[in-house]
Image: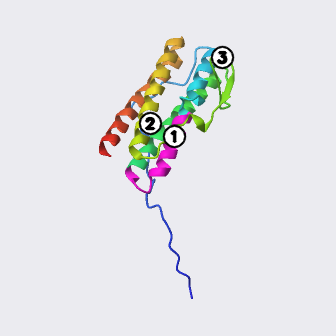
Amino acid sequence: MEEKRNSFVNTCSFAGVKPIMMDLPYPPIEVREQNQAYADLLGVDYCGSVSELSAITQYINNENRLCIENCSIAKTLLGLAMAEMMHLQKLGELIVLLGGSVNYAAKQQNGRKRLWTPEYLNIPEHAARMIQADIEAEKAAISQYQKHIRMIRDDCVVAVLSRIIKDEEYHIMILQTLLQEL
């Protein structure tokens, strides 16, 4: 006799999910000259406490936890994570062009390097709190990018950071809409 088993299945299909970004081109990934100080600043944007790596990880974690109960929000979070992956990739290219290395260690203000850690993430239990944490993370990223733009005197790097900010602002708008729908 065949034993009947109950199983749990995730019916949320992520086929066709695309990065959620502004429909604007990115400037070329280029730098005027190598500059380790600029590479270090971008390293913080790459893998610091407020960073693209943190955003990706937080979005994916929230998407995983919401995909069963709210597939549409999970798909949106995955699309946002994909956009952050593209930002991470562009920052990595700039860091290398500037003469830095991509090693998941961000140089802190005290000069020490600190490896990326999941301790940087804010992972609340409820969907509304997750979305609010994502909004706060996007706002912090914009603020940090604006600070770095004021410190960097390379128009090529500034152009890329300014374009990334446009996506982050768009992400806030999307997340605020999701929050209202909850």
Looking at marks 3 and 1 on the same chain, the residue that comes earlier in the sequence is marked by 1
In reply to whether residue 62 is colored magenta, the answer given is yes
Answer yes or no: do the residues labelled 1 and 2 have beta carbons within 8 Å? yes
In reply to whether residue 61 is colored magenta, the answer given is yes
**Residue type marked 2:** Ala
Q: Please report the bounds of the magenta region as a residue range.
A: 53-72
Name the residue carrying label 2: 133
Above or below, comparing residue 176 to residue 99 in the picture: below
Spatial CA distance of label 3 from label 2 is 27 Å
Above or below, comparing residue 124 to residue 144 in the picture: below
Identify the residue shown where x is 44% and y is 25%. 165
Identify the residue shown where x is 46% and y is 18%. 146
Identify the residue shown where x is 47% and y is 42%. 124
Structural crowding at the residue carrying mark 2, measured as other residues with C-alpha within 10 Å and reported as few (<14), some (14–19) or many (≥20) = some
Looking at marks 3 and 2 on the same chain, the residue that comes earlier in the sequence is marked by 3
Answer yes or no: do the residues labelled 3 and 1 have beta carbons within 8 Å? no
Between residues 129 and 67, which one lies in front from this camera angle?
A: 129
Image disc number at residue 110: 3
Does the rendering let one see residue 35?
Answer: no
Residue furthest toward the front? Answer: 125
Structural crowding at the residue carrying mark 3, measured as other residues with C-alpha within 10 Å and reported as few (<14), some (14–19) or many (≥20) = few
Looking at marks 1 and 2 on the same chain, the residue that comes earlier in the sequence is marked by 1
Image disc number at residue 67: none
Name the residue carrying label 1: 58
Q: Where's residue 61, x and y in %?
A: 52, 46
